[in-house]
Each structure stands twice: as C-alpha cells, then as structure tokens.
Amino acid sequence: MVEPFSMGAVGAVAVTEGIKFLYGQAAEVLKRWRDHKAGKVAEAQEPIQIKPAEVTGILEGTLEAPKVDFAVLDRLHDDIRQLAGVLGSFATGLDEPDPSDHDLASAADGLRRALEAVYGQRITFRGENRQPSGPTVIGRAEVDKVAGDVAGVRARIVRYGHVEGELKADEVAGTGSGVDVGTIG
C-alpha cells in the first residue's frame, strides 16, 4: 500500500522544500496549460526543466524531464490550481508548515498525485515509504474473453522507470499477459 504524503516521515525542512517544489511544478504545469490553450504548441510541449538544486536532498529517485499529458491536465487543471492555492502561503514562506496539519498533508499529497498523473512519473520525497521518483507505466486490461492477444502493458525497450501491468479475463482462448516487454534496462 502506498502511504500518502507524510510530513512526519520527511522532516520539517524537507516538508517546506517539498511544498515549494510541488508548488513550482504546479505553476509550470498551469503555464503549459495556458500555452496549450493559446495555441502555443512548441512552448506547451517543451519538457519541464527541473534544476538539480530544486530536488537535491528532497527527492528519492530521479524525475526525467517531465512532459505534460494534456488529456490528463484538462481533467485535473482545476484541482491543480485549487491545491496549489492551498499550498501557496507555505511555498512562498509566508507560513510555516505544521507537521501535524492533516489538511495541509492532504493538499500536498493531492497536488503530488495530480502532478504524477500529468507527468506519468512518480514523485517521492526522501523518507517516504513508496517507490522512488521516476517514470512509471501502469496498464490494466479487463475483458470477458481473450480471443486474440491482449496485454495490460505492451512495450518494447524500457530503459528505466517502473512498469506495472494487470490483465483480468474470465476466459482466455488466445494470448493474454499483464506485461509484455521486449527489453528492460
């Protein structure tokens, strides 16, 4: 089971830096959304540059230069905007985060999960009990009957990241797999 954003687990300094990071990423994502809506295709599709100084010591694992999935962002835009607003005074240093503030932890976790969906990458802070940061592919296929070939995830060459696939079928008369991968690493 994945544990939600735990301010106690990551420590007070890391919480402040983590909130700043999430807030900054939300601002970048929302800027890309505006560019996308304004027809500025090249600007919107540029990978988001993450400076090593922004993540050194706070992230577990490595985020690859994230690209925005606009189909996901269209669904989550309002949530990201609202959650970033909740974190704004903490990200800018106007307020100090309280490690026992469950509402703040929920807002940070909600923003993190929305950004993970938009990026297709996990964002994990040091000290958390979850998979490290980085690309992730999760696929599921649910069918009554497989008559041909179906896979939850089918990829050829996975150089890094985390891959999960699942297949649920009542009857398999062909070929079915949760993950069908040609090369890993």
Image (tube, rainbow, N blue to C red):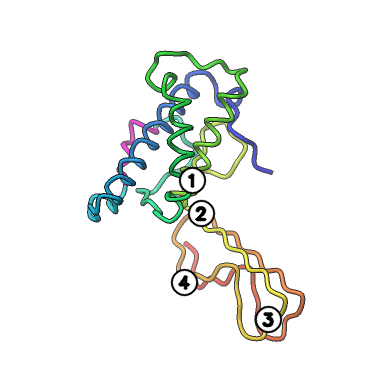
Q: Amino acid at mark 2?
A: Thr
Label 1: which secondary element: helix
| Nearest to viewer (mark 2 / mark 1) | 1
| Nearest to viewer (mark 2 / mark 3) | 3
Residue at mark 1: 116
Q: Is residue 103 left or right of residue 173?
A: left
Label 3: which secondary element: strand
Q: Amino acid at mark 3?
A: Val
Residue at mark 2: 136
| Residue in the picture at 41% in, 31% down | 23
Q: Which mark is residue 146?
A: 3
Q: Are marks 1 and 4 in contact (CB under 8 Å)?
A: no
Position above or below: 120 against 29? below
Residue 116: x and y in percent read: 49, 45
Q: Nearer the viewer, residue 71 or 178?
A: 71
Disc 3 versus disc 1: distance between alpha carbons?
31 Å
**Which stretch appears magenta?**
48-55
Q: Amino acid at mark 1?
A: Glu
Residue 129: x and y in percent read: 62, 37
Residue 124: x and y in percent read: 52, 38
Comes first in the chain, label 2 or label 3: 2
Comes first in the chain, label 2 or label 4: 2
Q: Are marks 2 and 1 in contact (CB under 8 Å)?
A: yes
Q: Nearer the viewer, residue 60 or 135?
A: 135
Disc 2 versus disc 3: distance between alpha carbons?
26 Å
Disc 3 versus disc 4: distance between alpha carbons?
22 Å
